[in-house]
Image: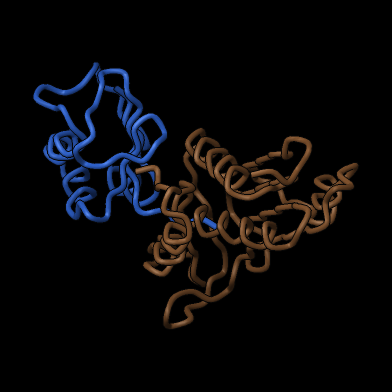
Amino acid sequence: MSGSLTAPLKSLSVQEEDFDVGAELKALTAGRTEVGAVCNFVGLVRDISGPDADHVSAMTLEHYPGMTEKQLSALIDKACERWPLSGCRIIHRYGRLLPGDQIVMVITTSRHREAAFESCHYLMDWLKTRAPFWKLEEDDQGQGNWVDAREEDDLARARWDKAAPSDKTQS
Amino acid sequence: MKILYFAWVRSTIGKGMDQLDGKPEGVQTVADLLDWLSGQGEGYSKALEKRDRIRVAINQDFAEPDATLNDGDEVALFPPVTGG
């Protein structure tokens, strides 16, 4: 698969602090004049949870240092093998966050829009089921509840298997 | 062998890590290790009661119950992930 003359910029941060989406977009496209398409996803903390729309006052994200970086880095490599990307960046936060806070960001850049759109979607679907993060939601009384995994997330990831039978899961 | 626990597996067991001197006697696979750990006290048996709710990583890669363990492995037990 050809598409970019230079190697894709791959970058990953797992951090407690917030991030500036505008600055991140600029950094990933600076000097890369072959880029014609930029796709960006940002995930935020919601103040409601579950089928009963329970109120959430805060959320703490726990993660597995080391495995998180290993899994996300492998995901970025897989996306860059599958699509002709110029750049790919993931930021995922951990620690205590409040409703409205940014949790996660994915940026993909390419010459044309299809690769940027598809790879951004692919990375989020895979990240939801492979990156070792766990959400602990706090209700108004300060009571913590671990969020259950959703079957929909596994199904969302599985559709990418059908699109490319050679793209096997890691286990 | 180092065994790490995360999320409610950690809070139910009551600690984040166990350091063992190699593999426990008779333990060859991930499933063997979960069986052995279940006998190590109330927190362990409660945390590992429902095996379909436990995910396992060996050396930071996802592993199935029949995966073989080595003495120096870093094993981690945790619930299905909920990031993003």
Point out residue B19 in the picture as x, y percentages from the top left corner.
Answer: 31, 23
Q: Please, is residue A53 above or below residue B43 in the view?
A: below
Which quarter of the figure has residue A123? bottom right
What shade does chain A have?
Answer: brown
Q: How many marks?
A: 0
Which quarter of the figure has residue A43? bottom right
Q: Is residue B83 left or right of residue B9?
A: right
Q: How is the image coloured?
A: by chain
Tell me the quadrant of the picture where the C terminus of chain A can be found.
Answer: top left
Tell me the quadrant of the picture where the N terminus of chain A can be found.
Answer: top right
Residue at the front extreme of this rendering? A2
Q: Please, is residue B73 above or below residue A38 in the view?
A: above
Which quarter of the figure has residue A148? bottom left
Point out residue B79 in the picture as x, y percentages from the top left corner.
Answer: 34, 52
In the image, the chain rendered in blue is B
Is B27 or B62 nearer to us in this picture? B62
Point out residue A6 in the picture as x, y percentages from the top left corner.
Answer: 78, 36
Q: Is residue A54 left or right of residue B34?
A: right
Q: Residue at x 69, y 39 (%)?
A: A10
Is A53 or A77 nearer to us in this picture? A77
Is B6 or A119 nearer to us in this picture? A119
Q: Is residue A144 left or right of residue A102?
A: left
Q: Residue at x 48, y 63 (%)?
A: A137
Q: Residue at x 47, y 55 (%)?
A: A164
Q: Residue at x 21, y 41 (%)?
A: B65
Q: In the rendered image, is residue B18 in sight?
A: yes
Is B72 or A90 nearer to us in this picture? A90
Q: In the rendered image, is residue A135 in sight?
A: no
Point out residue A93 in the picture as x, y percentages from the top left corner.
Answer: 62, 49
Residue at the left extreme of this rendering? B26
